[in-house]
Image (spheres, rainbow, N blue to C red):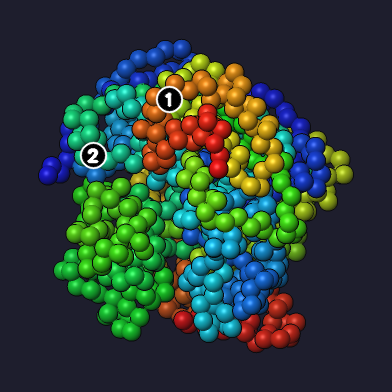
Amino acid sequence: MKESYSLVFNIKRHDPEAHKSWMQTYRIEAGRILRFTDVLRKINKELDPTLAWNSSCEHAQCGSCSVVINGKPMLACELLVENAVVYFGTTTFTIEPISVAPVLRDLVVDLEKAYDRVHRIRPFIIQPSKNPNQGQEYRISPRRMEGYLDATRCINCFCCATACISSHKGFLGPNAVMASVVRIMDPREDATEDRLKQLYSEEGVYRCHTSKACSHVCPKHIDVAHFVGLAKERDFT
Amino acid sequence: MQKKFKLSSTIQCDVLIIGAGGAGLRCAAHILEKRPGTHIIAVTKVSHPQKSHTSTAQGGLAAVDPKDAVDRPIYHMFDTWKGSDCMADQDVVQKIVDAAWEEIVWLENRGMHFTRDEEGRLSKRTFGGHTVRFGEASAFRAVFEADRTGKGIMDNVWGEALKGGVAFLDQTLLTELLIRNDRCVGAVLFMEKTGEFVAVSAKATVLATGGCGQVFRVTTNCRQNTGDAHAVALQAGLPLIDMEAVQFHPTGIVGPGILASETLRSVGGILRNKELDPFMARYAPKMKELAPRDLVARAIETEIREGRGILNPDHNIEHIWIDLRHLSDYVHEVQIPEVSGFFKQFMNLDPRTQLCPVRPSNHYQMGGIPTNAFGEVQRSPDTVIFGLYAAGECGCSSFHGFNRLGTNSILELITMGRFVGERVVLSMDEAAEGLPADAGDKTFSRFAGYLENKKEENIDQIREDMRRMMTENVGVFRAEEGLNTAIHALTVSAERVRGAALRCRSLQMNQELVQRWEIDNLLSVSMVIAQGALRRRESRGGHARVDFPQRRDEFNAHTLACMTEFGKIQFASRPVDMSIFEAKGDNYEKFGLIERKY
């Protein structure tokens, strides 16, 4: 087992003021269990403080640090150096920003723009159903929840939307569709028809080509395509 | 020659909420439910509200279910008071505990996916320090959403805020509070994405920016938790309260700083040092690994200090081991799959066959911007700043005193968020006041300085050194000598960073510029923590003085610290509210100056 690796990071950079984009190569030595966010921090400290990248919680719970590494959208905070070397079979990595939002600088994208699609599906209960226990909690059986619970683990990192082959052509995108499916299946929501109308609209699920790239890249291991499939088949039982 | 900056615009709104995490957006949701159409701007430093630190809370949310046959609010109040080491304010404790279940119902009715029992009711679990009948037995008091309760709260309050029509400003910093004659009229913001400065005029300004864990080398806090509102409040001449009260969790995972929860020890995990000696037996012969958080943290820290720690070469930090190898497959697969998974995910270790590295990690700031029980920010114990509020980890009404119980933090942020909302609603009919003519000037001179400095310094190195130094001297253990060392080192760091040049001199999306600003905030907050810790010559809750190991009644008051000039602190104090004790109702004696023994 190697203790440390000599890495080559080819990073796509962008300067918003000069309207200039270019690839920049950084050579850096990194310990085997450093995460890619640690390596980016190391680059800032040792080589180039101007390189901009995004992160927040850095333990795969917020979805801020998504980047495209050797073609695959991933969370930089949970990719360990030695795992990356094994997975990609190389010590050279090309790192680019995710493609579903405009780049602000280097690896930082305007996530607010990516979120527009999630906002469009209205990620809340639009019309609450009648609660038989007024002033108390709704009763929902764990069995009923099982059908959609996995989808609630989504952190909107947009890895699926980046991998999705339909995402750039007016499709709401896998994560947004999934968020709407959760509320369709949630007994507390009454606005099911409203939601379905959107899911079967021009920007809806029939844009999906069922490549299942979404499920393949999801860092939370959610079978995103399954939930998109439920919407296609209108099968929410 | 100073660069000429100007405000790119002045925005009017009813309510300005700075920090769009659980507390800030719960506040927004309440205001919009009671007064639809209120113009609210919510500002967040992260790239989207959903990325807030609230989302990382795992365990649960303490609240006494009125349908519960055994549990009662008075028990929860007692546990919180005892846990606080007699420093929580009892009026606040009563108010939050009494409102807790309403908040659970609010969250559930708006769509939070709480974990449920077979009958479809909310499941509850036990947590350290939560008991029934004043310590007799463990209480099942924490409702939860699997291991992602904070995310459940965040998704919900964000959704409700969005539904109500809040306008969001993402990746935006609070750089200046506009206060005139004890009235806050708004704030100056810096928008990272465009590099613009804006002034916002608001009838109410709410601070909800979270904690300041980045002061320390190993922390469970997000990258953005740099004590920004704390520092801006200091610059505005406001005090901070009880900043020396910092909680360290005994077992953070080396590297990402994620928590390896108490569960690992409760299922039989053994802590071992470099020689593989199960050292807890020497510190707590009976309780061993199950001793309270602070005791375990101090034991681990002692082992490391006495040379029996292990140095992790990649993260360059010392730790001890937690040994889970002897536990059955059933335990690994059923009882600890998540935490066990973290070691695999972030350290590439298999806890079934390998030792796992952990160490005490900064977790929570009990102190903050002082408020009363309504969340109104105080200048002194008897004066509030009109129109300025604080809630969540950045505020301190003092619900936690000097030590916070698990599951009380997200309860506090959600209830205090609502309380602030209630107060704000009452003030909405007043007219907004104009902004001062010099709004932004302080921000401009600060930012111009950053961009014009010429001295060659490695700011990242200064920051790293500071965090290491704070962990060593102002962390789990504190003593006069180390604290004086820390105060001196902070002065030196502040001097070093003062003239440091930036390589990227743009205002637009300049990470280096933001980090330069952050280090000023971190240094200010660190200085207040260190000096507060030096002044408090006793041990209480999360504040452990090796040279004064006992709690002392003469220190039975909150610390207020003002610092308008770096390093020069004016201290005052605020009495601890003991209204439950003084009311002499049933069981009032439990709320006296009791011992914190478990």
Choose top left, top right, bottom left or bottom right for residue B269. Answer: bottom left
Query: Which of the marked residues, 1 or 2, is nearer the chain's N terminus?
Result: 2
What's the residue type where badge 2 is placed? Answer: Asn
Residue A109 is labelled as none
- Camera-side residue of B519 and A136: A136
Q: Looking at this view, name the residue that lies furthest to the top.
A: A19
In this rendering, does residue A107 appear at all?
A: no
Secondary structure at numbered mark 1: loop
**Structural distance between the alpha carbons of marks 1 and 2:** 29 Å
Q: Residue at x 42, y 12 (%)?
A: A20
- Camera-side residue of A18 and B314: B314
Q: Chain of mark 2?
A: A
Choose top left, top right, bottom left or bottom right for residue B310. Answer: bottom left
- Camera-side residue of A175 and A149: A149
Q: Chain of mark 1?
A: A
Q: Looking at this view, name the residue that lies furthest to the left.
A: A1
x and y, in percent, of residue B509 in the image: 49, 26
Of the residues tagged 1 and 2, which is closer to the observer?
1
Residue position for label 2: A83
Instruction: Say left or right for B466 vs B569.
Output: left
Residue position for label 1: A210
In this rendering, does residue A81 appear at all?
A: yes
What's the residue type where badge 1 is placed? Answer: Thr
Q: Are marks 1 and 2 in contact (CB under 8 Å)?
A: no
x and y, in percent, of residue B219 in the image: 41, 53
Q: Residue at x 30, y 32 (%)?
A: A43
Secondary structure at numbered mark 2: helix
Instruction: Say left or right for B255 vs A99.
Output: left
Work out whether A231 lies above or below B88. Answer: above
Q: Residue at x 35, y 46 (%)?
A: B464
